Each structure stands twice: as structure tokens, then as C-alpha cells.
Image (cartoon, rainbow, N blue to C red):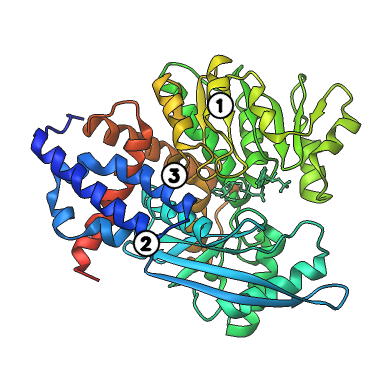
Amino acid sequence: MATVQVKQDQLEAAKKYVNEVYEVVQKRNQGENEFLQAVKEVFDSLVPVFAKYPVYMDNGILERVVEPERIISFRIPWVDDQGKVQVNRGFRVQFNSAIGPYKGGLRFHPSVNTSIIKFLGFEQIFKNSLTGQPIGGGKGGSDFDPKGKSDNEIMRFCQSFITELSKYIDPDTDVPAGDIGVGAREIGFLFGQYKRIRGGYPAGVLTGKGIGYGGSLARTEATGYGTVYFVEEMLKDQGDSMNGKTVVVSGSGNVSIYAMEKAQQLGATVVACSDSSGYIYDKNGINLATVKRIKEVERKRISEYVDEHPEAVFNDNYSDIWLTPCDIALPCATQNEINEVSAKLLVANGVKAIGEGANMPSTLEAIDVFLSNNVLFGPAKAANAGGVAVSSLEMAQNSMRLSWTFEEVDAKLHEIMKNIYRNSVDASNEFGHPGNLVVGANIAGFKKVADAMLAHGVI
Ligand code: NAP
């Protein structure tokens, strides 16, 4: 694809515009550090787009896209097993519906606040656009901590949460899914109560449902598999592959487990994974069946792994996982888990590729380290878009009242990940940043949303 030629004065005008809008965003969203970080990364990438298409500036697209259409914040009262009343705070940010109904997960974690939900919702707009599916951007959650809670407490909390949220969502308006702390168990409780309140069988209101009641095969695997498919595409372009590579994956939740599974299927050896209490290193390669049992069935700590695999070691500092030499690093736990120091360590130890399974796992400084050292870098928006892509396929199956096979969904997921990679590469080349998929993914995701917003007028 030919590189876009823009004059220096157009570039300067675009830079000035972007900086001015960012200053207003900073003033309006003081203290929301995660949100500002996500905005800064996107804004910096978009300068060449505004230089080439001033119509976006003239129509205030940036000012509008950075302001959520709506934020809902609500009280979630529930009763614990001791009979004591507990109160948590719930959120849903309905960020942008230019190309489809709001779509994005729910996160239950004590760190959840407005800044976290807004950063996730903002990223989601462009990620969802990249999938090629007709879905807008949203995100939600609560500061509820599921750790140590009984199944009954989880159920009562989920019922209270969705009782309030049910006033604002339906299959054509806003379709939540899982994220940190929200898996199949929670989606089941949320769906059951929503159905009870709203009546009928509103299957399409939530994705990540169980297979027996409207879920899609391969949804559980989609984010992790998709991240590895994306990394495989980056490697393929260099005449390389996952086969024979040493891989480190942070986290041991939904995204991590299925990233490990696909990496192993493609011939890589995964030597380390983690949870918030520390990481395990197994030079023989992680035994995934053990990890699945500990984390998915028993809901215990990753440290239990070494009891069964005495050659493995446990280290109680989870961020030290990045000291482990590897060819490929897949951060799949949480935001800002790789800082500049960790990035430099990974580079010094010879890392060849990064695939961001988690959302915004690398700080802006860490990304600079990777890009300036020519490490293949798959940014979250592109690399982890497989989960929401298959969620959209789940919505399609619910609307058609049919179910595709695992192989059919997996093949569609693989194709979507290849397209996201190709579109991001093409945009990075076209706008003069070859090899920079951060810029490529941001531009490719943004343009479709911006064009829809232009078509809709000033709303
Ligand atoms: P999950 O199943 O709840 O697993 C999260 C994992 O990360 C757990 O091992 C958890 O450890 C660890 N973790 C969470 N917070 C941490 C922290 N502050 N420090 C260290 N470790 C931490 O969640 P998930 O669905 O896999 O999500 C992981 C990441 O992927 C998130 O960034 C999420 O936004 C992103 N993502 C998820 C999807 C999806 O489909 N689920 C799609 C796109 C992106 P503990 O068990 O000790 O808490």
C-alpha cells in the first residue's frame, strides 16, 4: 500500500489539534490515569489521519469520540453468608454506538473505578471496530472482590448487580460479557436473573454463556487462541513460526490458559505463568491440565502447582516473571504489568515477539522499548480482539437460533485475526509507520468509527 503524502504544515496543524483536545481531556478527567494513558496512546497515533483527512477535525470527531455517550454508576447491596449487608459500586460505560450496540465485558475486581472502566471502554471502541463486526464500545464492572466468596455470595451479588443494570441493557442496545473475575459461573447467574426480570428468552443480552443455553463453542478459548494466532501472523511475516519457541505467559485465568493451550498446540514450550500471588517456572514445560484443574475447577492459587511438579519452582513476586528468558512473551493478566524495566529485561534476554492478551498490559514507556528494539509488538486492541469477535459470533448465532461447530467458529476466529493483522499492517504502512502495529491498529480501528460518526451528523 502506498504511503500517504501529507505536507508538513498539515501535519503540524493536526498535531496542534490533537494536543489541544488532549489538554481538555486531561483537565476534564483529572486523576483518571489509566484512562488518560489509553487516550494518549490512541491520540498520538492519529496525527497522520487528521493531517490527511481534516474533515475529522472540522467535525469534532476526536472531541466526541473521547467522551462516553453515557456512564451509569450504581449501588449494589447484597447480603453475605454471615447475614451482613455489603455494598459495592457498579459501573457501565456506554462509550460509543456509532457502528453497533455497545459491547464489552464486565470486570469484578477491587481495583475497579471510573478510570479503569473508561480506559477499557475507550479501547473497546477501536478493538471492536477492528474485528470487522457491527459492535460499538462499552465496558462495565464492580469493585466487588470475588476471591474467597462462596458460590451463594457470588450468586447474590450477581443478582443484585444485574437487577440494576437490567434497566439499561438489552440484545439490541448493550451486550456485556466476561472479563477479570467474570467467567461462565458469573455470566450464568447474571443471565438467569436478567431473564427472570425481563421475561422471554433474551439470549443475546450477554455473551460467554454456557453452551447448553445459548453460548458459542470456542468463546472460552477465543481471546487466548486469537492472541496466539495474531503472534503467529507476525512471525510468519518474518519467515518464522511458534514452533520450537520458548514462551512466558502471565496470569492463569481465561485468556492465559487458552493462550498457553494454543501456543503448545503450535509446538511452543510454555515455561512460566502466574497469578496475583506469584509465578511458577517449569523448565519441562507447564502442565496445562494441572493449571486448568487448580484455577478453573478448584479456584486455588497457582503456587499449588509445585506440589505436583516438584521440578517446578514458585516465586512469590508475580512481576519477576519477566526475568524469565523467552522468545515470546504474552502478558495476559492485567494493565501496566510490563513497565520500562521489565521491557528492557525482556529485550536483554532476547525476546522476539510480544502479544498483548491483557488490556494495556504494557506501559507507554515499555512499548517504546519494544518498538525501538525492533521486537514484534502485537498491541492489545488487535491481538486480544478474538474474544469480542467470537462474542459477536455468539450474538449472531443467538439471533439465528442455531449453533455453529467448534471448528466453524475457530476457523472464523482465525480468519478474523489474520484480517486484523493485515489491516493493521496496511494502515501502518499507508500512514508512514511501517512495523508499528500500535499506530496501525489505532488508525484502522478509528477510521471506520469516525466515518460512521460523520455519516450520523453531530450527535
Ligand atoms: P481472569 O480469568 O479473571 O484471569 C485474570 C488473571 O490475571 C488471573 O490469573 C489473576 O490472578 C491475574 N491478575 C488479575 N489482576 C492482577 C493483578 N492486579 N496483578 C497480578 N495478576 C493479576 O481474567 P481474564 O478474562 O483472563 O482477563 C485477563 C486480561 O485479559 C484482562 O486485562 C482482560 O481485560 C483481558 N481480556 C479478556 C478478555 C476475555 O475474553 N476474557 C478479552 C480481551 C481482553 P488472580 O487469580 O490471583 O486474581
Rendered image: mark on residue 196: none
- Within 10 angstroms of label 2, few (less than 14), some, or many (20 or more) residues? few
Q: Which label number is shown at residue 28?
A: 2
Q: How far apart are marks 1 and 2 (CA)?
A: 31 Å
Find residue 210 and report its image quarter.
Answer: bottom right
Q: In this view, does 9 lie to the left or right of 248?
A: left
Q: In percent of the image, x 37 and y 45: which residue is there?
A: 40
Element marked by disc 1: helix
Q: Can residue 122 be seen in this view?
A: yes
Residue 305 placed where, x, y %? 84, 34
Mark 1 / mark 3, whichever is N-terminal: 1
- Give whichever of 283, 57 is nearer the camera: 57
Which percent across, then down, holds residue 41? 38, 42
Q: Where's the N terminus, which quadrant? A: top left
Q: Which amino acid does label 3 sit on?
A: Lys
Which comes sooner in the sequence, label 1 or label 2? 2
CA–CA distance in space, label 1 to label 3: 23 Å
Q: Residue at x 47, y 66 (%)?
A: 93
Q: Which of marks 2 and 3 is in front?
A: 2
The answer to whether the beta carbon of the residue marked 3 is less than 8 Å from any atom of ligand 1 is no
Along the horizontal axis of the image, is 64 left or right of 279? left
Residue 405 vertical placement versus 249 (above, below): below
Q: Which residue is drawn at 64% across and 63% down?
A: 143
- Position of 31 with respect to 298 (left or right) is left
Task: Name the residue type under label 2.
Answer: Arg
The earlier-in-sequence mark between 2 and 3 is 2
Looking at the image, residue 140 lies above or below residue 235: below
In the picture shown, does residue 56 fall above or below 274? below
Q: Can residue 268 be seen in this snapshot?
A: no
User: Which numbered circle lies on residue 341?
Assistant: 1
Residue carrying label 3:
381
Disc 3, SS:
helix
